[in-house]
Image (spheres, coloured by chain):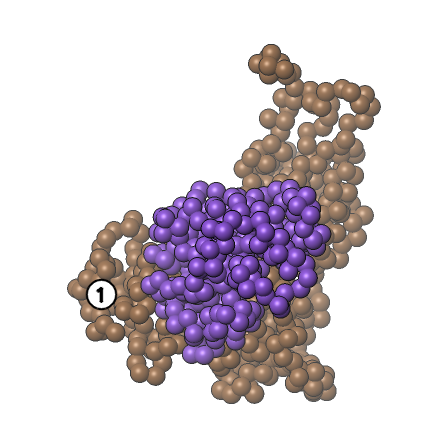
């Protein structure tokens, strides 16, 4: 092993600058050159006699997984040293504050917590979309940037579905951070992305109340408590907390992964749109489950083992958020039932799929002396009622559904923005009507959304009736060159 | 250097050609054939000729149990496999039979070991089909990287900690970093007779410099290869398996 690294030395072409962090696991140094166009740091493990191996596995995992990750929510990977000679990792330095520092100022009110929580959920969702699971979500590993985004750091316990899991079958106590790890992680399951959602719930609980829902157990038996234990409802600890926030937090930390949010995108959405959230008993309860009901859960949990928590790789795929753009200004348009049918078909693929209905209405200037019905809020309400009427035949439970009327003069960019901010996976919208002709497509909302969306877009059309079977399949005039060659 | 690892070709020249083309398009400049060049398929002579043509440029070739059976009349094989070997014996030229007979069971090069079945006792043709079997093969191979076939599936075994191994099912076409810090055993898949329900040919690329392995599946006309087996009058079972990839 090399001597301890000191500022001023050069390692594999990297000039080592000041040490900015020194902990039990290792040290972090700034890199002064070469310049990559963004600040970089070198992480070096602390290799004592006893803990050497464990530290190195986490370096090996980071060196394996980080180069495969993309996007604004993970630091860019630069290089890794030879683990047998000079173990180190060079990555982008993310400027911001880790959330553990934020915690020092006491609990956050709901209004401040919700956007931070949604940003954490965005980052986790982006990771899950890339077939990776972090497995060590905790305040120290969440960096809040000035722009409000969260960057995830420390991938030493992470898992990527396309790479062998170097921590597989490691029954070590510490495969995660004790207060935050999910019940299935306690049992040694390392394949369920919903473990990150559990940890997110613990982080939200802690940020909102200043307390940990399951404490910091020091024994394996204490860790197993979270397989059945009902934590103190956060509103007991923070009486000002609105019921919607308790609802979201408690749903994240359900002991059974099937009862949690199935996608981090859904957590982000609920934190951003709390007024749309359907409250259950979770949101209002102020008492833990009764002694007997907790004993019952303990009895069932005591035999739980890895086998019952096996997750197939296909489950790592996401649980989509579907957005449908409804033209509430023309409720009788013949395309409406066709669009509704397509929406129903898409939703039928999984009971976990969520639907966001959006209507973009042109903002009308409010005339002086207008009555209440004609005012902006009156128009808004009118469209909301029409939207509710449109979606009613789908008979969706309220928790799967949210309705939004947005006033804008540019429906294309409004829909695109809304879809991006809410991690939408599929956008459904209607094509220009068959009476409008080919040129209409290029000017349509559908074409702009299709061209610029970051997700899949289903453009729904009414099949044109009455064409004879031998008529050409498009209205476009054939290309003259093509005609000649034919 | 990128090494193409091809095993269990089983006289399927169509599948071999498809994999060799795919490998060279993806930068392979070194070839290793991990045994079972013949048996089951309809073109033993063409397959042996093709593989021999890679020997002058440094290809690695080891012997599989079907190659061995051409010479030794293996008693353990089932009737269909035996019929195919008897036919192969009649079809192959004396030089080709001498080539198969001359092949070694195990070859070592640097950190790598190439062997058809388990390196623990290669002449017994034991299957490496579980983490413990991978561990004994890698222990006997005394190599960082052990490459094998025989099982007709793609799998990556790796050492988690001293004496403890695990298995990973790779995603075709997705490169996997395999650091020389730990030991690995890759089952490279079968070129000529895949048995995992997917009829496309299987092989693997390994880049020893960047320490990356990529398992590949290559689509080829497997129905044509099955037809040739029937036309040659070989047992129906072998044609059926190619059609189903089973």
Q: Is residue A111 visible?
A: no
Residue A301: image location, x then y, percent: 66, 82
Q: Residue A460 falls in which quadrant of the image?
A: top right
The secondary structure type at the circle numbered 1 is strand
Residue A103: image location, x then y, percent: 44, 71
Q: Residue A225 falls in which quadrant of the image?
A: bottom right
Q: How many marks?
A: 1
Asked if residue B41 lies left or right of residue A328, the reply is left
| Residue nearest the observer in this picture, B84 or A212 | B84
Q: Can you say whether A133 is above or below B225 in the image?
A: below
Figure quadrant of the C terminus of chain A: top right
Residue A437: image location, x then y, percent: 68, 21
Residue receiving disc 1: A18
Residue A472: image location, x then y, percent: 72, 20
Q: Can you say whether A348 is above or below A365 in the image?
A: below
Q: Residues within 10 Å of mark 1 (few under 14, many from 20)?
A: some
Asked if residue B169 lies left or right of residue B181, the reply is right
Chain for mark 1? Answer: A
Q: Please name the residue shown 55% across and 76% down the image.
A: A188
Asked if residue A462 lies left or right of residue B125, the reply is right
| Residue nearest the observer in this picture, B215 or A469 | B215
Can you tell which chain is drawn brown? A
Q: Please name the residue shown 35% across and 75% down the image.
A: A25
Asked if residue A470 lies left or right of residue A233, the reply is right
Q: Please name the residue shown 52% across and 54% down the image.
A: B37
Can you tell which chain is drawn purple? B
């Amino acid at each position: 092993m090399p001597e301890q690294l000191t500022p001023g030395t050069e390692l594999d072409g990297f000039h080592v600058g000041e040490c900015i962090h020194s902990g039990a696991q290792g040290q972090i140094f700034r890199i002064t050159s070469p310049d990559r166009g963004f600040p970089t740091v070198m992480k070096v493990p602390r290799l004592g006699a006893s803990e050497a191996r464990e530290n190195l596995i986490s370096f090996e995992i980071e060196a394996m997984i980080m180069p495969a990750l993309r996007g604004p929510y993970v630091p860019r990977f630069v290089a890794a040293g030879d683990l047998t000679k000079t173990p180190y990792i060079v990555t982008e330095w993310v400027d911001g504050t880790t959330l553990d520092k934020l915690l020092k100022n006491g609990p956050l009110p709901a209004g401040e917590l919700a956007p931070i929580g949604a940003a954490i959920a965005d980052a986790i969702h982006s990771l899950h979309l890339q077939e990776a699971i972090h497995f060590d979500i905790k305040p120290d590993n969440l960096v809040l940037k000035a722009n409000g985004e969260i960057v995830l750091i420390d991938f030493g316990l992470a898992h990527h579905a396309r790479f062998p899991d170097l921590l597989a079958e490691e029954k070590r106590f510490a495969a995660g951070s004790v207060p935050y790890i999910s019940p299935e992680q306690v049992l040694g399951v390392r394949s369920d992305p919903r473990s990150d959602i559990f940890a997110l719930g613990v982080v939200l609980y802690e940020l909102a109340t200043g307390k940990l829902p399951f404490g910091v157990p020091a024994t394996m038996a204490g860790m197993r408590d979270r397989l059945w234990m009902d934590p103190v409802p956060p509103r007991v600890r923070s009486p000002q907390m609105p019921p919607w926030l308790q609802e979201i937090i408690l749903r994240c930390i359900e002991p059974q992964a099937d009862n949690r949010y199935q996608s981090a995108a859904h957590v982000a959405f609920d934190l951003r749109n709390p007024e749309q959230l359907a409250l259950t008993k979770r949101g209002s309860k102020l008492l833990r489950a009764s002694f007997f009901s907790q004993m019952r859960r303990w009895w069932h949990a005591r035999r739980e083992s890895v086998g019952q928590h096996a997750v197939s790789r296909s489950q790592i795929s996401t649980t989509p958020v579907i957005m449908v753009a409804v033209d509430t200004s023309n409720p009788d348009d013949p395309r409406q039932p066709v669009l509704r049918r397509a929406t129903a078909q898409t939703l039928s693929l999984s009971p976990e799929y969520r639907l966001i209905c959006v209507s973009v209405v042109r903002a009308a200037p409010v005339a002086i002396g207008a009555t209440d019905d004609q005012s902006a809020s009156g128009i808004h309400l009118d469209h909301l009622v029409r939207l509710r009427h449109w979606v009613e035949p789908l008979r969706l439970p309220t928790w799967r559904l949210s309705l939004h009327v947005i006033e804008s003069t540019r429906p294309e960019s409004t829909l695109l923005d809304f879809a991006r901010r809410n991690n939408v996976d599929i956008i459904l919208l209607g094509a220009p009507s068959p009476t409008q002709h080919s040129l209409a497509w290029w000017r349509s909302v559908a074409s702009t959304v299709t061209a610029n969306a970051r997700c899949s877009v289903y453009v729904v059309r009414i099949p044109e009736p009455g064409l004879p079977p031998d008529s050409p399949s498009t209205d476009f005039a054939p290309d003259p060159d093509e005609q000649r060659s034919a | 250097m990128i090494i193409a690892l091809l095993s269990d070709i089983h006289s399927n020249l169509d599948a071999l050609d498809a994999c060799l083309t795919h490998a060279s398009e993806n930068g392979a400049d070194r070839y290793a054939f991990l045994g079972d060049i013949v048996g089951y398929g309809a073109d033993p002579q063409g397959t042996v000729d093709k593989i021999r043509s890679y020997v002058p440029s440094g290809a690695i070739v080891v012997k599989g149990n079907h190659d061995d059976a051409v010479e030794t009349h293996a008693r353990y094989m089932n009737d269909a496999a035996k019929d195919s070997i008897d036919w192969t014996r009649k079809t192959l030229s004396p030089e080709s039979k001498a080539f198969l007979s001359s092949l070694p069971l195990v070859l070592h090069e640097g950190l790598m070991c190439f062997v058809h079945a388990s390196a623990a006792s290669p002449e017994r043709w034991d299957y490496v089909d579980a983490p413990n079997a991978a561990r004994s093969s890698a222990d006997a191979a005394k190599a960082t990287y052990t490459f094998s076939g025989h099982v007709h599936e793609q799998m990556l075994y790796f050492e988690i900690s001293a004496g403890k191994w695990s298995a990973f099912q790779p995603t075709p076409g997705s490169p996997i970093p395999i650091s020389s810090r730990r030991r690995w055993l890759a089952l490279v898949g079968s070129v000529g007779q895949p048995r995992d329900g997917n009829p496309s040919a299987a092989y693997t690329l390994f880049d020893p410099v960047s320490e990356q392995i990529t398992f590949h599946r290559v689509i080829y006309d497997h129905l044509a290869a099955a037809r040739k087996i029937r036309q040659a009058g070989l047992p129906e079972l072998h044609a059926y398996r190619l059609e189903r990839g089973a």
